[in-house]
Image (tube, coloured by chain):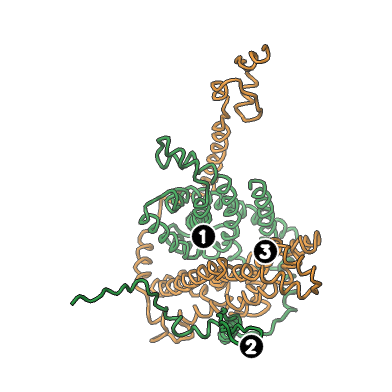
Chain colours: A green, B orange
Amino acid sequence: MVKPVQNKSNIEKPSWTDRHFHKYLFKKIDVTDEKGNVIDSIEKPARLSWLWAVVIAIVFGLCLIVAPFKAVQWSQLGSIFSQLFTPSEWSLKTYDGWWNYLWNTACPAIWDTIEMVYIATFAGVLISIPVYILAARNIDRNPWIRGAVKLIMNILRTIPTYVLAIIAAIFFGYNETAGVFAMIFFTQGVMFKMMFEYVETCDMNPFELALSCGAGRLQAYSIGVSPQVYPMLLSNTLYTFEINVRASVILGFVGAGGIGQMLSDAIESTNYDKVGAILVPLFAVVLILQLVSSYLRRKIS
Amino acid sequence: MEKDKSLIEDKPLTKTEKVKVSLGKKIIDFTSLDQAYSLRPRKWIMNLVWITIILAILVYFSLDINFYDHFRNPNWTKFGLMWKGLFNVDWSYFFGYGSFSFNTSVIYQVIETFAIAFIGTTIASLISIPFGFLASHRLIGNWALISEVILICIRTFPEILFGFIMIKVVGFGAQAGVAVLSIHSVGMIAKMYAEQIDLIDEGPLEALDGVGASFPVKLKLGVLPQVKPNFLSVILYRFDLNIRTASVLGLVGAGGVGYPIDVYSTNEHWEQLGAVLLGILILVFAVDAVSTTLRKRLIQGN
């Protein structure tokens, strides 16, 4: 006796969610004719937005247990701002001292920060170029290399920048070099994420043309894909430069040099007038950089 | 006939013309392939100039901040100690038993960080809705500039300084973090809302106009279905960023995981530092993964 072979692969097994939650996920609607007889019944996906609303409300409520609302003293806001912009008796004394501090101490520190950011952006972008080429599906055909690169980059990107800065500060000492290293990793992660998806959407015809003429894959990339990627690379570099300036303020708080360190010192020693004197040029510089970078990026693209 | 001949002839170029062509300044009608090739734009000259300038600035800057001096003398012993501590995690601190109570454990602080980010993002996403509509050029024309300037100022203000100010207003603890995030996130969320509103398709709106729908109905049936998935994806993206920001705000004392990181790294308690870093990495990784998958599903329309 030979048993007939059952072809199981054709029969689709209902999934776990289908078996248990199908009646909640879909709404049954009967189709009737003019006399009211049921001809057919169709299934319509049920509306689940109320479920999401309930879930969010519950999580919000649970979060409120940990961080309950508290009365806000708005009157304090005025006093803190007046403390920021009036020189106090024990630190800067007069308005002349305040302006002097702003020009001769705060502005050079911001210039230092910009120097840090320039080095970090340059190095980070340079490192990211081979990495995103290796991760792009249409350039690199080896799935193992692609997977490994993506995994490593995702893990690196998860680490917050100031954690990298702490580790770098322990290694290089509490100075600008530590901040530069933290920002190199950060820049490289951001660039990688923005660029490799862009490379995958490029027009591949020039690349294949170069391949068919006998070029190697790298040569074909440089002649066929690189010109398409170039404007995007430039615009993203400007963008990361702008983000890095903002990030460098935080890095200073863990001791990685630049304007942030000066700010953190001023806050810890309760010299709030110094905080104000640093805040004004910092705000101006970040604002100008943001406007210039967005203008240039619009021009490039 | 004569005209044709003159076209075929190779005209030698003057020296100034060659320079202009090499800089890509002038377009010339080529008379032969060889001439066209000899006149290909010499972009490498300008590229070389740019690269030289960029590298010169780089060298000057790195000398100015003594990059190499610090780079040459790393502190290997301290780094080794820290490395050992990072992998010998203090589990009693992580879970809050033994000499640590639950309220000082890493788990509690991680939950607090999550709570700050969640409440902050929720409030900010609600505040952003009117700001987003007010910053949309397509809806209200040039008046949107006022709202845009406000949003740029909010975005530009360093969040850590904002945290310092909010601590004075609200007091130390998680509430200051919530206040900072719910105001600071508006800058970015509202800007992205406005971008999405500017992109909507006007077809459904015209159709609703045609059947005589009122403004709220138009908003409900014409605008909301188009922008809802994008709005949610913006909120999820910002939530992902806010988790990081919330952990940073602890550095100035606004609750969350940043404060213990600061304390233990300056006091060189590496095993506790390892526990905190593990906690924050798990949180960031989990939120990043969830937010990425949800955003992908939202944009694909599931």
From this view, report whether residue A185 is shown above or below residue A253: above
Q: What element carries label 1?
A: loop
Q: Do the residues labelled 2 and 1 touch (CB within 8 Å)?
A: no
Q: Are marks 1 and 3 in contact (CB under 8 Å)?
A: no
Of the pair A10 and A116, the residue shown nearer to us:
A10
Circle 2 or circle 3, nearest the eye:
2
Tell me the quadrant of the picture where the N terminus of chain A can be found: bottom left
Compare marks 2 and 1 and give the one earlier in the sequence.
Answer: 2
Q: Which amino acid does label 2 sit on?
A: Gly
The residues tagged by marks 2 and 3 sit, at their Cα atoms, a distance apart of 45 Å
Circle 2 Cα neighbour tier, 10 Å, few/some/many (<14 / 14–19 / ≥20): few
Observer able to see residue A63: no
Taking the spot 77% from the left edge, 75% from the top edge, the residue there is B216
Taking the spot 52% from the left edge, 46% from the top edge, the residue there is A203
Q: Which amino acid does label 1 sit on?
A: Ala
> Mark number for residue A256?
1
Circle 1 or circle 3, nearest the eye:
3
The residues tagged by marks 2 and 1 sit, at their Cα atoms, a distance apart of 77 Å
- Disc 2 target residue: A36
Query: In the picture provided, is A168 more to the left or to the right than B212?
Result: left
Q: Are the numbered discs 2 and 1 placed on the same chain, yes or no?
A: yes
From this view, report whether residue B41 is shown above or below residue B190: above
Observer able to see residue B145: yes
Taking the spot 71% from the left edge, 72% from the top edge, the residue there is B129
- For disc 3, the chain is B
Q: Are the numbered discs 1 and 3 placed on the same chain, yes or no?
A: no
From this view, report whether residue A231 is shown above or below residue B227: above
Residue B178: image location, x then y, percent: 62, 77
Query: In the picture provided, is A153 more to the left or to the right than A60?
Result: left
Residue B120: image location, x then y, percent: 62, 76
- For disc 2, the chain is A
- Disc 3 target residue: B196
